[in-house]
Image (cartoon, rainbow, N blue to C red):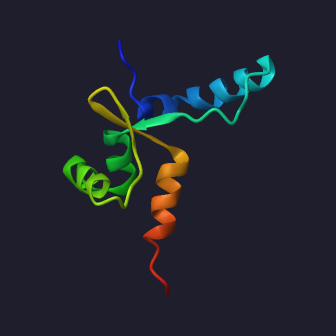
Amino acid sequence: MRATRAAIRSTGMLDRDRQTRKSTGMPLTEPLTLSSRDVADRLGVSRPTVARLIATGDLQAHRVGRQYRFTESDLDAYLQSARVAS
């Protein structure tokens, strides 16, 4: 059974994974990748909108096979660039 990131987050499995990596000496800087669905959910937009952001170059992505993957830093960079001055 494939667990979704939301389900993993709600159970705290990501935190446990980070703790496990910390205790075993695995680098914590290893980026966790996000799918286009994860990014769409975080931004509150549709998946076609995410595809449009990639096509226009506003959102950086990594192509793995036929899928796009994103790192947290890709998403953070987009959010910083899309910030509106108040």
Q: Return the x and y of residue 62 as percentages of the image width and height.
A: 41, 39
Q: Return the x and y of residue 5 as percentages of the image width and height.
A: 43, 32
Q: Is residue 86 above or below residue 41?
A: below
In the image, farthest residue toward the top: 1
Identify the residue shown where x is 39% and y is 28%.
4
Point out the image quarter for the N terminus. top left
Identify the residue shown where x is 79% and y is 21%.
25
Q: Is residue 84 above or below residue 11?
A: below
Left or right placement of residue 86 versus residue 24 in this view? left
Q: Return the x and y of residue 59 as percentages of the image width and height.
A: 38, 55
Identify the residue shown where x is 30% and y is 57%.
53
Say which quarter of the image contains residue 57.
bottom left
| Front residue of 60 and 84 | 60
Q: Return the x and y of residue 45 as percentages of the image width and height.
A: 27, 56
In the image, farthest residue toward the left: 48
| Front residue of 4 and 65 | 65
Identify the residue shown where x is 37% and y is 41%.
38
Q: Is residue 18 above or below residue 50?
A: above
